[in-house]
Image: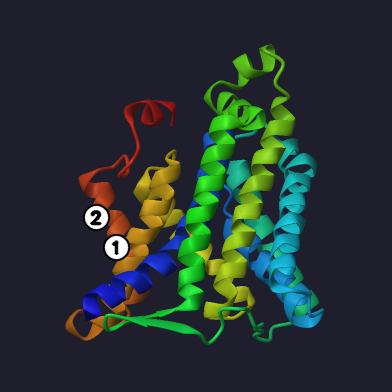
Amino acid sequence: MQLIQLILDGVASGCIYGLVALGFVLIYKATETINFAQGDILMLGAFVAFSLIGVLGMNYIVGFALTVIIIAVFGFLLDATVIRQIIGQPPFATVMLTIGLGFIFRGFASIFWGTDIYSFSTPFSGKILQTGGLVISYVNISIIVGTALLMIILYSFFSFSKIGVAMRASSENQLAAYYVGIPVKFIFSLIWSISAGVAAVAGVLLAPVTLVDTSISLIGLKAFAAAVLGGFGSIPGAIVGGIIIGIVEQLCGTYENYLFEGVREISAYLVLILVLIIYPRGLFSDKAEVKKV
């Protein structure tokens, strides 16, 4: 029973890693750019939610939705005004730019919100569900359900909407998409917007668990490991990779006495190294994606 409990807790934390990893994958599939500021965008989403819900007293659902919209617009403008300016430059330039943007975002958060640790109440705070000897917090349930709903929405969007199909076409072949009249630059900005919105969802869902401060941006590192673990071009792989890392973290934290001190903090990277040694392409990557890289 304890093992099932640990797995459930791991799935909840893994969903957060998976959502942030999803942002990595969406941008990479479309632009072959790695956004190392993804964790910092999650942090901004958590702070914006705190301001709307915790400070202004806005309804949780309304504040949640408004946070996602604000951060999504921010992501769109970030690509349109900053990222787009270095198109054609070596990949290293983009990597350094996004790392630099991450430092800027954390610095802005420290200046604007300070270095204190914040929290805000949600409809799920302090509530638990007990069934069959298992104890599941409503916060964890909201994370799992929220992740599942978001995946369904994104799948439907990319599969059935005209814009979603245009995004898929642009990610497969930018030049061909341009020749058939798809506004590729606008599509790329929209992908950055969706990626930022997904990070904001993760930030709001995570805030009741870890509280709100600048350190939550470090989740981006574990999410990056989840994206690589699942296969960097695979959307389902991002979620599965995140869940695997979340479960392993919970198990390592519980059985740390039988392993070595601090194993929980590095377990994500140990799993990543092990999988890449055995299966370098990641769990859900395919040959076509490897050739593209």
Q: Identify the amino acid type marked 2.
A: Leu
SS assignment at label 1? helix
Q: Between 38 and 49, which is closer to the camera in this rendering?
A: 49
Residue that numbered label 2 is attached to: 274
Measuring from the top left, give residue 205's x and y in whole percent: 57, 69
The answer to whether any part of residue 33 appears in the image is no
Q: Identify the amino acid type marked 1.
A: Leu
Colour convention of the picture? rainbow
Label 2, label 1: how many angstroms apart (C-alpha)? 6 Å
Residue that numbered label 1 is attached to: 270
Which residue does the image show at 62% across and 31% down from the upper left?
A: 161
CB under 8 Å between discs 2 and 1: yes
Measuring from the top left, give residue 98's x and y in whole percent: 63, 51
Left or right of residue 78, residue 263 in this image: left
User: In the displayed structure, would residue 289 be above or below residue 206?
Assistant: above
The answer to whether any part of residue 55 appears in the image is yes
